[in-house]
Structure formats: structure tokens, C-alpha cells
Image (cartoon, grey):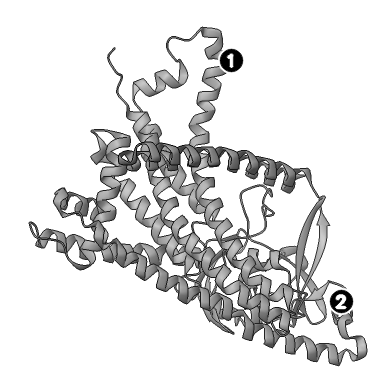
């Protein structure tokens, strides 16, 4: 924030705008898109081949059962997570857009992240995902104090189940779909010594609306999303520090390099967003608007990169957009002037009955609806874009038995340009949504601090 | 087949008509006054975002109805 505002102040001279240089972004971004589209379309294939081979051997071992291998593997606690199910595009998409405790790089290689876990009766546990010895599909082979790792996410065996504490080698994990309190849920079990123990997901505070609920432990880990946010924050910090240093050193000269790249964005936010929407007192809000813009833009763009430092779908996570919208809500509400409250709570020139029954309730609801739509817009746009890209990639698997038949190759060939197109569109959406978030924030702040017009 | 999904679809139809109107009218306006293209574009995006907001609220409500019911 500090560097953003310092940078902005160093550049009040409007002659130095260099919008021509935007072409650099275009070239860079199209390159990125090409590379990432290639990667997304190509990467799942070797993995799938491997999975297929595994499946084939298992089927073979099960005798002549062939396609009935899955049924034969079903134990008392459901089927093993190591048995490859039939490809499910929906599950695949959801798995790739949700948060995880470890970052999957390639094959069985994981970028391990620190875990900070808290269970009320057992206190804090600090470890890393490396302790779970994750192998194929992020399934850990070792349990640590009842915590296990399944599909890159930490889960915990319930206290009542009597799962042993300390380091335990887990033989297998099983899963089955069940109906709990009238809702469809996928339950997971850890199998140790032939006995299966039920596992719990981390506590969520939504009261079970999104499928979570209050469980026996809390997860404060540095997850993939947190890591991506820290990474983006640091990246922005160094970029803007370099630009700010260059800006203070070359006062009065034409900007070059990095400074020249970032300056059009800063002046754009100031001249096209802050000044028209907020009015003469815009300077006070510039640090927030610039920080929000570059943070959202950075996360949107990094979320587009499908390999290691990227891949975290941060702005497509409702908690993150919720926090950003709360910031806008707090800033606009706390800087609201008398004029704003007067027009919200007791609109002048309207009959009292109309005010009490219609206008005031609607306006009060509006105060909360404005940040609500703000958070939903960003979340829905980014998530929808990612799901569409993943669906196009999934086409390969849906059509052609994991890319091994002619159908798969044809669908694969068709899905590369489709993915490329979608990712280019997402690139536009990344800029557009960052802009709209800041634009609407500025509008809300502007309407809150508006001074009365003297008629 | 759930009514929640149907509701989400209907909300999207409404938003589609709304955003289509905004885009069409903005094109008309730009054709009439090409020099005002900057202002028109900024307002077009802002209005489209507001219409989209209404549709998103409907979609999330539909999602909650489906998850809760």
C-alpha cells in the first residue's frame, strides 16, 4: 500500500503516460496463454495412461471381472481411493478449483507447505505436508496424531473412533457416498490393520450450507491459496518498490522499463476510476484502490498459470473475495457523511409511510447487498472461467477413454483451440474484473462521501 | 432435475437480455457520437456489472436452495 501511494504521488505529471507500451502486456499475455493452454491440454495424458495401466492390472488381478473391478474392491467401508473410478468431469473440475494443503507439481512431486492444525483437546500441531509422505494423487501413507492427507487435503480421524495417536502407517483409504441428515455426503475412512476409522474434514463456519460444518479440528495451515497470496504480495511489493525507486530517481525524465509498464495502470486508476467516481477527495482512497486493483489483478493472472507458482484459484475462492468486499464495505461505511445516512435512512421529500415501509428497508438492505454482489461477481466470474477451461480439458477424457482412442485424440485436438480461446477470454476477464471491483468500490465510496448539492 | 437449476437458468436469461440491451444501446450511442466512446464504454461496463450482480444473487440463492434442500 505504501509503495503504491508513493508511486502514485511521484507520478502526478500526466505528460508521462505511455499507453503505447500496453502492447508489451498483450504479447506477454498471449505467450503465457499459449504456454499454459499447451500445458493444460497436454499434461493430463501421461497421468491418465498411468492410471489406465494401473486399472488394467487391477482388473486383471481380479480375474475375469474386467469392468467389475470396482465392485470387487468395495469393502465394508466403501471402495479404496486407489481404485480409479470412471472419469467424472464435475468432480475433476471441483478438485482443481478448490484449495489444498499441498501444491501438486507433476507426477508424485509435491510442493510441501506448512500445516498448522488445532484440535480443542489436543492443542496445536505444527508440521508440513511432507510428514504425511504423499504419493500418487496426494494420498499420504502415514498418519500423524490422527491427521491424514487425502487428495492433498488434511483430514482427521474422529476422537471417538480410537484411532492411535503418533505416527501410524495407513494401509488404505476408502470412500463411499452416503446420506447424512438428508444430505448427500462423501465419507472417507482410513484403514489400519483391517479396521476402518471415519475421517472428518476441517471445521467451516458456514453451518454446513456448503457441505462443511463444525468438526473436531481447525486448520490454520498455509494452504495453496495462502501461499499464492503471499507470493503475489511479495511479487507486487518488489515490483512496486523497484518502480517507486525508479520514479523518485528519474523525476522529470521519461519513464523506462518496469516503471513505464506499471505507470499506465496507476494513472488509469487515478484518472478514469478515482477522480470521476470519488471526486476531489480521491487522494485519501488511492492507496486502497490501487492495492485492491493490483492484488486482484495479480491473483487473477497467477490463477491462470496452470503450473507450480500459479495454479492457486485464489480470487475464485469465496472467502478471499468476501474479505476484499468487507474492506470496501468498511471503508465506504465508515467514511460515509451525514448526507449519505440522511438519504439512506430518511430520504427527504418522500411521504413518511413510503419511507418506513418501502424506501428505508430497501436502502438498508442495499448497504449490505452492494458488497455482497461485489464479492459474488469476482468469485463467480473467475470460478466460471476456470470451470469452463477444465471442462474443455475434460472433453478429452469423456470422449475417448482417457485419450487412448481415436475419439479422444479428435476431442483432444479440438479442445486445445477451445482451451486457448477460453484462456484468452479469461485474460480479458482478469483485467475486467479487477477494474470493475475497483470501479464499483470507488463508486460506493464516492456515493458515501458525497457532499450535498446546494439548490 | 431441480427447480433451483431452472431458477438459475431463468436468472441468466434475464441478465442476458439486460446486458444485450446495454451492449446494443452502447453500440448505437458510439455510432452516433464516436468521440464519446470512452465515457460510453466506462458506463456500459459499470451498468453491465450491476445487471450481472442481480443475476449472480439469483444464482447463489439457487445454489443455497439446492444445497439446503
Residue A75: mark: 2
Q: Position of residue A396 (x, y in %)?
A: 67, 75
- The chain ID associated with circle 1 is A
Quarter of the figure with residue A389: bottom right
| Secondary structure beneath label 1 | helix
Residue at 73% x, 72% y: name it.
A398
A382 versus A24 height, above or below? above
**Residues at marks 1 and 2, CA–CA distance in whole angstroms:** 61 Å
Q: Earlier in the sequence, mark 1 or mark 2?
A: 2
Question: Is residue A405 toward the left or the right of residue A166 in the image?
Answer: right
Q: Position of residue A256 (x, y in %)?
A: 17, 66
Q: Residues within 10 Å of mark 1 (few under 14, many from 20)?
A: few
| Secondary structure beneath label 2 | loop
Q: Position of residue A103 (x, y in %)?
A: 53, 74
Quarter of the figure with residue A353: top right
In the rendered image, the residue lying farthest to the front is B32
Residue A320: mark: none
Quarter of the figure with residue A129: bottom right
- Foreground: B29 or A406? B29
Question: Is residue A344 toward the left or the right of residue A161 in the image?
Answer: left
Q: Position of residue A230 (x, y in %)?
A: 40, 64
- The chain ID associated with circle 2 is A
Q: Residues within 10 Å of mark 2 (few under 14, many from 20)?
A: few
- Foreground: A214 or A311? A311
Circles 1 and 2: CB distance less than 8 Å?
Answer: no
Residue A357: mark: 1
The answer to whether one can see residue A166 in this image is no
Amino acid at each position: 500500500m505504501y509503495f503504491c501511494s508513493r508511486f502514485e504521488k511521484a507520478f502526478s505529471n500526466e505528460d508521462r503516460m505511455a499507453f503505447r507500451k500496453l502492447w508489451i502486456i498483450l504479447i506477454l499475455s498471449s505467450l503465457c496463454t499459449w504456454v499454459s493452454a499447451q500445458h493444460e491440454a497436454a499434461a493430463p495424458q501421461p497421468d491418465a495412461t498411468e492410471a489406465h495401466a494401473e486399472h488394467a492390472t487391477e482388473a486383471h488381478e481380479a480375474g475375469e471381472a474386467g469392468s467389475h473391478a470396482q465392485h470387487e474392491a468395495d469393502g465394508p467401508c466403501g471402495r479404496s481411493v486407489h481404485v480409479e473410478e470412471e472419469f467424472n468431469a464435475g468432480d475433476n473440475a471441483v478438485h482443481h478449483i478448490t484449495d489444498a494443503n499441498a501444491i501438486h507439481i507433476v507426477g508424485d512431486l509435491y510442493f510441501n507447505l506448512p500445516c498448522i492444525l488445532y484440535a480443542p483437546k489436543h492443542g496445536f500441531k505444527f508440521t508440513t505436508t511432507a510428514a504425511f509422505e504423499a504419493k500418487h494423487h496426494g494420498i499420504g501413507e502415514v498418519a500423524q496424531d490422527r491427521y491424514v492427507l487425502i487428495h492433498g487435503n488434511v483430514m482427521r480421524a474422529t476422537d471417538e473412533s480410537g484411532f492411535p495417536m503418533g505416527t501410524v502407517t495407513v494401509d488404505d483409504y476408502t470412500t463411499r457416498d452416503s446420506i447424512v441428515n438428508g444430505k448427500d455426503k462423501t465419507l472417507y475412512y482410513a484403514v489400519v490393520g483391517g479396521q476402518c476409522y471415519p475421517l472428518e474434514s476441517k471445521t467451516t463456519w458456514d453451518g454446513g450450507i456448503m457441505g462443511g460444518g463444525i468438526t473436531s479440528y481447525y486448520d490454520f495451515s498455509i494452504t495453496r491459496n495462502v501461499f499464492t497470496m503471499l507470493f503475489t504480495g511479495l511479487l507486487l511489493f518488489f515490483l512496486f518498490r523497484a518502480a517507486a525507486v525508479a520514479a523518485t530517481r528519474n523525476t522529470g525524465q521519461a519513464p523506462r522499463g518496469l516503471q513505464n509498464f506499471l505507470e499506465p495502470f496507476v494513472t488509469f486508476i487515478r484518472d478514469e476510476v478515482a477522480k470521476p467516481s470519488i471526486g476531489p477527495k480521491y487522494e485519501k482512497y488511492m492507496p486502497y484502490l490501487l492495492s485492491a486493483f493490483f492484488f486482484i489483478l495479480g491473483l487473477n493472472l497467477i490463477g491462470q498459470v496452470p503450473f507450480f507458482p500459479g495454479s492457486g484459484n485464489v480470487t475464485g475462492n469465496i472467502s478471499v473475495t468476501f474479505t476484499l468486499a468487507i474492506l470496501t464495505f468498511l471503508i465506504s461505511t465508515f467514511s460515509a457523511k451525514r448526507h449519505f445516512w440522511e438519504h439512506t435512512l430518511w430520504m427527504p421529500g418522500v411521504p413518511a409511510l413510503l419511507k418506513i415501509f418501502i424506501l428505508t428497508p430497501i436502502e438498508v438492505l442495499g448497504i449490505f447487498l452492494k458488497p455482497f454482489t461485489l464479492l459474488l461477481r469476482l468469485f463467480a466470474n473467475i470460478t466460471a472461467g476456470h470451470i469452463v477451461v477444465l471442462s474443455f480439458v475434460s472433453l478429452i477424457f469423456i470422449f475417448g477413454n482417457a485419450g487412448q482412442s481415436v475419439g479422444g485424440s479428435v476431442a483432444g485436438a479440438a479442445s486445445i483451440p477451445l482451451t486457448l480461446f477460453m484462456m484468452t477470454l479469461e485474460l480479458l476477464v482478469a483485467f475486467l474484473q479487477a477494474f470493475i471491483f475497483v470501479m464499483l468500490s470507488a463508486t460506493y465510496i464516492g456515493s458515501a462521501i458525497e457532499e450535498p448539492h446546494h439548490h | 432435475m431441480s427447480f433451483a437449476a431452472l431458477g438459475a437458468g431463468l436468472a441468466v436469461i434475464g441478465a442476458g437480455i439486460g446486458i444485450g440491451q446495454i451492449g446494443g444501446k452502447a453500440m448505437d450511442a458510439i455510432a452516433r457520437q464516436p468521440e464519446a466512446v470512452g465515457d460510453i464504454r466506462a458506463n456500459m461496463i459499470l451498468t453491465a456489472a450491476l445487471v450481472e450482480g442481480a443475476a449472480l444473487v439469483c444464482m447463489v440463492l439457487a445454489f443455497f436452495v439446492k444445497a439446503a434442500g
